[in-house]
Image (tube, helix red, strand yellow):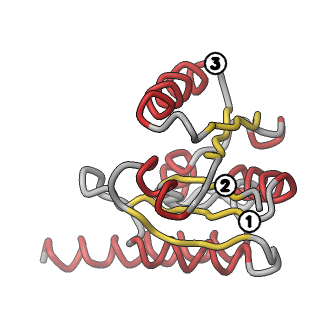
Amino acid sequence: MKQAIYPGSFDPVTLGHLDIIRRGSRVVDHLIVAVLVNSAKSPLFSVEERVEMLRHETAHMPNVEVQSFQGLLVDYARMTGSAFIVRGLRAVTDFEYELQISQTNKMIAPEIDTVFFTTSLNYSYVSSSVVKEIASYGGAIEKMVTPYVAECVKTKIKMQMEEQSYEQH
């Protein structure tokens, strides 16, 4: 069985992420979407919320499983028995960064390969950071995320704004 991991922060999951998940799930028997627990970042959504959003969005994909992990990706890949890491590339700058990471992973774990998918053109401008930035100013994000995720983002941002307003009074 060919198994792969598609790691990321997915804060929030975008249509670009879902495109990579769909395409990745077609070339392996089992795809684990692995939400990274990264204490160095302060995400909009908790790990549990991100896992839940991804499970909701991938529920119709029988060979996709969503988990969270922390630590080295190659250690997690070994632990799950995954032979491949799936990564998406939007631009040349992504490639330079991802190449360095994949080469480092290959040095640590020679048995694990990285497979790159270039982002579909209609999602090449989409990133979680852009989604959050636009949403924080009340802009339309419906062309970058699913309706479910758009509602989650808007609700979360509204809650944060109310908390900030409460703290200032």
> Which one is earlier in the sequence, the residue at label 3 or at label 1?
1
> Which one is earlier in the sequence, the residue at label 1 or at label 2?
2
Task: Name the foreground residue: 18 vs 152.
Answer: 18
Residue type indicated by callout 2: Ala
Circle 3 sits on which residue?
A: 92
Q: Is the C-beta separation of discs 3 and 1 under 8 Å?
A: no
Circle 1 sits on which residue?
A: 30
Q: Marks 1/2: CA distance?
A: 7 Å
Task: Name the foreground residue: 115 vs 51.
Answer: 115
Task: Name the foreground residue: 164 vs 96.
Answer: 96
Q: Residue at x 63, y 37 (%)?
A: 114
Task: Decide if residue 71 is on the left or right side of residue 33.
Answer: left
Circle 2 sits on which residue?
A: 4
Q: Is the C-beta separation of discs 3 and 2 under 8 Å?
A: no
Task: Decide if residue 159 is on the left or right side of residue 33.
Answer: left
Q: Marks 3/2: CA distance?
A: 24 Å
Q: Is residue 90 above or below residue 147?
A: above
Residue type indicated by callout 1: His
User: Which numbered mark, 3 or 1, is in the foreground of this view?
Assistant: 1
